Image: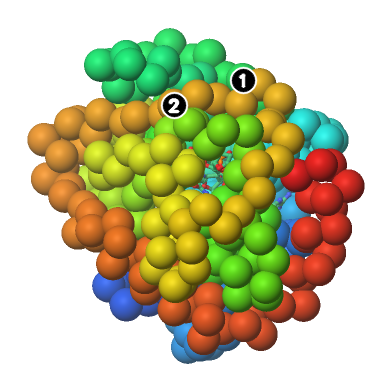
Amino acid sequence: MGTILVTGGAGFIGSNFVHHLVEHSDHRVVVLDKLTYAASASSLDVLPGERVELVQGDVADASLVDDLVQSSDAVVHFAAETHNDNSLADPSPFVRTNLVGTYTLLEAVRRHSVRFHHISTDEVFGDLEYDDPAKFTESTPYNPSSPYSSTKGGSDLLVRAWVRSFGIDATLSNCSNNYGPYQHIEKFIPRQITNVLTGRRPKLYGEGRNVRDWIHVADHSAAVELILDRGARGQTYLIGADGERDNITVLRTILRLMGRPEDEFDHVRDRPGHDLRYAIDSSRLREELGWEPQHQDFESGLTATIEWYQENRQWWEEQKAAVETGYAEAGQ
Ligand code: NAD
Ligand code: DAU
């Protein structure tokens, strides 16, 4: 396929995907990333310069995007504002990056007839009751709860409209909660690991009964590569690895694996509008494209993730105090 433009490739999932492409393909990768607070250019440092180029820039910059898309064979679009709590405090960058940024890319791939894969989230479907036997499927109606998830839902609809009206060659995927290395410490799992590593008490929103459907980021990367290669034009694929767990169970597991008492944490203010439960039915991806997750042992994935944060303190340590000050100001 030649050159792949990866937007948001200095963020958590994007950088893991770039590592995956370097390891599992011959593609050249150009990363377009604004390098916001959520990015870490150093996540790409160990990769060979002749395979990976980092361009600092905004996906809403039409001229830059046009140049980069024109010289690419495919675009995988990860770039987004991604943290629900931030979207409640200030939705504006979410609207600009997630909606205007996606629109800007769509116009460029339309002009230059370039293959496009759009990365999205299970949060576009809203949430499920705890006892609902149903899971999200590709035909679940959209019902997003937060400014973040509504802008992601809007971006998905833009992609579908550009497929239908302009015939662009695009696919979409909606994945559940990822965990693994290089995840920003504002997010639940790395926040709690780094709380323990810095002598702070972990923080659980509300009672911690909310359920997330955890998938290792390496399984997400493999699924995206497969969809990019073999996905049907215009099709949406849900990505999930049957990893439903409530937050209090995940937190107690982290504490146990780190040798701490399982009740050594604080309950803090709950997130307004907090989605109760996500659960993905990934049958289409498994049956039509033959994808299977390879990292379903959550405890061993979590152990490796804890070790990664222990061994890579320089990657996160400088940000820790400021992240926790921000949370403390919000009562979380
Ligand atoms: P992240 O916050 O770790 O990284 C986002 C990256 O996008 C950062 O490097 C940031 O600098 C970049 N970015 C932000 N605004 C930009 C702009 N205007 N122009 C260019 N770059 C910009 O996010 P993540 O968790 O890696 O999520 C990546 C994608 O996957 C997002 O689209 C997100 O909605 C989706 N997703 C995430 C999860 C999850 O569990 N984290 C699950 C499903 C889907
Ligand atoms: O489902 C996919 C989504 O997963 C992605 O689209 C988002 O980009 C990604 O951020 C993630 O969203 P969540 O809101 O589920 O992730 P977060 O890590 O913020 O929180 C996970 C759960 O843990 C959620 O129920 C809130 C809770 N939580 C979070 C933090 C940061 C806590 O209990 N304590 C915390 O300190």
Residue placed under numbered mark 1 in the picture: 145
Residue 175 can be seen in this image = no
Q: Position of residue 320 (x, y in %)?
A: 75, 69
Residues at marks 1 and 2, CA–CA distance in whole angstroms? 12 Å
Q: Which kind of residue does numbered mark 2 sit on?
A: Arg
Counting other residues with Cα less than 10 Å from the Cα at mark 2, is it few (<14), some (14-19), or many (20 or more)?
many
Q: Residue at x 24, y 34 (%)?
A: 282
- Mark seen at residue 277: 2
Mark 2 C-beta closer than 8 Å to ligand 2: no
Q: Check whether the beta carbons of the residues at disc 1 and disc 2 lie within 8 A of each other.
A: no
Question: Circle 1 — which element?
Answer: loop
Mark 1 C-beta closer than 8 Å to ligand 2: no
Left or right: residue 23 compared with residue 38: left
Q: Which kind of residue does numbered mark 1 sit on?
A: Ser
Q: The N terminus lies in which quarter of the figure?
A: bottom left
Q: Is tag 1's residue or tag 2's residue first in the polypeptide sequence?
A: 1
Q: The C terminus lies in which quarter of the figure?
A: top right
Q: Residue at x 81, y 68 (%)?
A: 321
Vertically, is 49 above or below 139? below
